[in-house]
């Protein structure tokens, strides 16, 4: 697919050099999911980070999110910011978005880095998503925040916290839920990019968050095993590498992308 439509997505743009397009996770944002490593990524690259509908400064969509449309919008955002070709780093739901972008726009995508991601929710993950949606729809923001914190963060990260630090984390989880959270988690439930995996023809790194109980290492390995020649690296983190191990996460991404230059 060679045509690129106009993108309605608000975006963060930083740095100069080879292109890097970012795809964030469900209920997240570019600043929320990549904020701690944005400066490090932008030291060597022109980084474009679009916020999905209902996140950041992007208005909520009028209907259900569609994976093809979202992938096309991300690519269009990068092109609008002057990137003809680019690598894509996808986190969590951003992984399937990146994979679909690579199969729909192979002439533009040069490499993939997929972190804490999945190709299709397992039976266990579907149970988790159903609970997540129930809590988000309930209006009980405190309960939703406590559940998200418990499930998303790695046990060692939480175990080391003081009660005050834990309360701060829960408050952040409560206050940072975007207007499009339900739309994005519903898309998580519908994702199926298993057929895309074998069509990837660019260098790919799958970073497995080894302590992840949301998108478990089972999912990470499934993605890596399905992509021809994909590399696999483990990170001692739960589902929140930007909070739990930002320096190590940044190091893995930069080392891989630098090797592709």
Image (cartoon, helix red, strand yellow):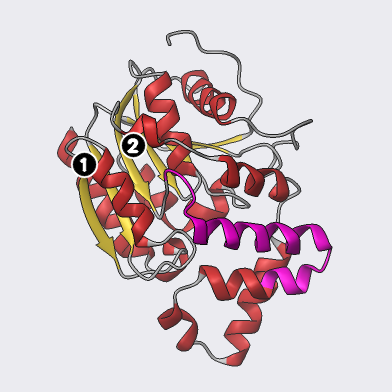
Residue named by callout 1: 230
Residue 66, given in percent of the width and then of the height, sits at: 62, 30
Question: Looking at the magenta stretch, what is its main secondary structure?
Answer: helix
Residue 240, given in percent of the width and then of the height, sits at: 47, 64
199 shown above or below 241: above
Number of numbered discs? 2
Q: Is residue 122 magenta?
A: yes
Q: Going by the image, does 260 lie left or right of 100?
A: left
Residue named by callout 2: 45
Q: Secondary structure at mark 1?
A: loop
Q: Is residue 172 visible?
A: yes
Instruction: Looking at the picture, tell me which residue is in the foreground, 148 or 259.
Output: 148
Mark 1, other Cα within 10 Å: few <14 / some 14–19 / many ≥20: some
61 shown above or below 220: above
Q: Which residues are magenta?
A: 119-145
Q: Is residue 16 visible?
A: no
At a point 47% along the width and 19% down the height, the residue shown is 79
At a point 27% along the width and 40% down the height, the residue shown is 226
Instruction: Looking at the picture, tell me which residue is in the foreground, 36 or 175.
Output: 175
Q: Tag 1 or tag 2, which sits nearer the N-term?
A: 2
């Amino acid at each position: 697919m060679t045509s690129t439509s106009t993108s309605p997505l608000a975006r963060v743009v930083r740095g100069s050099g080879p292109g890097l397009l970012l795809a964030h996770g469900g209920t997240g944002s570019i600043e929320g999911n990549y904020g701690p490593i944005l400066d490090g990524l932008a030291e060597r690259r022109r980084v474009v980070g679009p916020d999905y509908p209902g996140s950041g400064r992007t208005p909520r969509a009028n209907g259900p999110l569609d994976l093809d449309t979202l992938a096309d919008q991300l690519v269009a955002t990068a092109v609008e910011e002057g990137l003809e070709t680019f690598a894509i780093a996808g986190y969590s739901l951003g992984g399937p978005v990146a994979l679909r972008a690579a199969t729909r726009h192979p002439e533009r995508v040069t490499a993939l880095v997929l972190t804490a991601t999945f190709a299709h929710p397992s039976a266990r993950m579907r149970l988790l998503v159903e609970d997540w949606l129930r809590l988000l729809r309930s209006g009980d923001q405190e309960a939703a925040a406590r559940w998200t914190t418990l499930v998303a963060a790695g046990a060692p990260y939480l175990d080391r916290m003081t009660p005050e630090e834990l309360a701060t984390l829960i408050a952040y989880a409560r206050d940072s839920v975007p207007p499009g959270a339900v739309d994005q988690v519903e898309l998580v439930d519908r994702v199926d990019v298993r057929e895309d995996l074998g069509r990837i023809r660019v260098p790919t790194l799958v970073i497995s968050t080894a302590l992840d109980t949301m998108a478990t290492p089972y999912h990470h390995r499934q993605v890596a095993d399905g992509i021809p020649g994909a590399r696999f690296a483990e990170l001692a983190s739960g589902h929140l590498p930007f909070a739990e191990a930002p320096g190590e996460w940044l190091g893995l991404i930069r080392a891989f992308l630098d090797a592709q230059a």
